Image: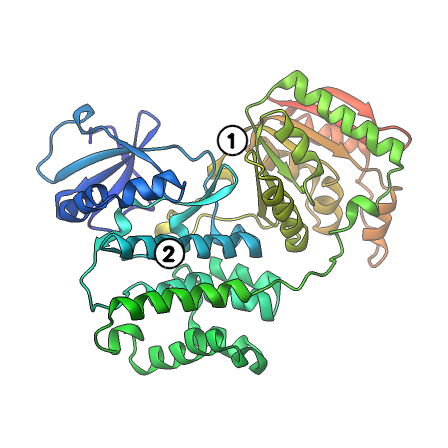
Amino acid sequence: MKTSDQVLASSFRDPSGFLFVSEEILYRQVNKVYQEHYCHLIKSGLYDSLIQDRLLIPHQEVLDEFPSNADVYKILKPEAIPFISYPYEWCFSQLKQAALTTLEIQGRALAHGMILKDASAFNVQYHLGRPIFIDSLSFERYSNGHPWVAYRQFCQHFLAPLVLMSYCDIRLNQLMEIYLDGIPLDLTSSLLPWSSFLRFGVLSHIYLHGKCQKRFSSATISSTSGSVNNNAMLGLIDSLKTTIDQLQYKHRESLWSSYYTDNTYSDEDMTEKVVLVGRVLDEIQPETMWDLGANTGRFSQLAAERGIKTVSFEGDPVSSEKHYLTCDESKEKNVLPLIMDLANPSAGIGWAHQERQSLVARGPVDVVLALALIHHLAIANNVPFEKIAEFLSSLCETLIIEFVPKDDSQVKRLLSSREDNFHDYTQSLFERAFETFFRIDQSIAIGDSQRILYIMYSE
């Protein structure tokens, strides 16, 4: 490392090495204490096997570019991931695929004489439309007969939230934001219906595992059970795969998941809106975009068709699930659907509030698209126009935003169950507030809907 290099705040727990940034490029330092394991990862063929099937992020060895250091064995330059997301921002199917990816990697590691010492969901990222493992230092040489030390972590990070989302409520993945080392198994057991324990995998990996964990304090169930041969280890992996494969999200409609088929637009107005947004994107030609309030991703797809790397944020987990399944089926590489309540966006959390980045810290982005959003923030969440404008200005250089008037059917829907105290919800006051932070370049009426599409540039 050079004196000007910056160690990532999230990379301090593993003595094997750490991540750092030099001249805006991400690198990973491999310490000499990890030399034996790293050499086996490369020479055993495991690295090549995982890279070939896009299960592990590839890297280049670039030690010669940095000053020599007695503690350093290698300096790696991993392939860049444009946007870092977190498990509490994933829908059910994203977390399920990340879990199965981790188990596939664990199985391949065993076949090459290695094992995952970590099974954290934070070691997986979504890149080019699919989950990929990012921690090259999570692999250790495996001694036959030893238990899987990351078994408990896997159950807490993957199986527990998936079971809760499947049997209880799809929104319970949000517990991952509170329990950064995974949802405790005893808590999971207390929340599950008794009928869930009729499934052997849930009974053994959640309920009985949690009981054993409580009995032996911080010890894992596997570490208290003596030696484990390879066949037993493979059986454990297969059991976890089967349990996760069988978990399903019970599809149901939410208030907003059918928004595109139940909204204030005529077919003609919706067609015009699609054409307008597409034309603006063609004019701006951004490389990156965040779609705020993306619903099931109709307008994110417009950006993806133009090769724009797009992150789609939606507060409704059912809509986000639908969007992800559509992207997965079409093998879409340019869109990442995520769950995000924009009235309470992801904050900086973890040690010293820095291990997991806030939404703002992961920006700015070239363009923010905010369609059919302003009324949800201003009326449903009582956020003044000035606050919304200030927040959006911190996220982007260009803003494409839709103003939804008060006599719109969707605004009336929001006001139907509350007193209308929103006398300052007007187009003129909207423009005045946003002009403090943006230069309004265009305002375009969207057909006969009375909605207005604005194109603004950050001042």
Quadrant in the picture for residue 169? bottom right
Give the quarter of the figure containing the N terminus.
top left
Residue 314: in sight, yes or no?
no
Pick the front one: 19 or 140: 140
Where disc 1 sits, the SS reads loop
- Residue at point 25%, 73% (across, down): 223
Q: Residue furthest left?
A: 70
Side of 69 relative to 370 (left or right): left
Question: Picture coordinates of residue 244 (x, y %)?
Answer: 50, 64
Labels 2 and 1: the sequence-earlier one = 2
Q: Nearer the viewer, mark 2 or mark 1?
A: 2
Q: Position of residue 136 (x, y in %)?
A: 29, 44
On screen, residue 70 versus residue 43, left or right, reads left
Across and down, in percent, residue 226 comes to: 22, 77
What amino acid type should be assigned to the residue bearing mark 2? Ser
Question: Is the residue 391 above or below the residue 314 in the image?
Answer: above
Picture layout, residue 160 above or below residue 333: below
How far is mark 2 from mark 1, CA to CA? 27 Å
Image-based side of 195 in relation to 26, left or right: right
Which residue is at 42% across, 69% downward?
239
Q: Is residue 291 left or right of residue 275?
A: left
Q: Pointer 1: what residue?
A: 364
Q: Residue at x 79, y 44 (%)?
A: 260
Q: Which mark is residue 120?
A: 2
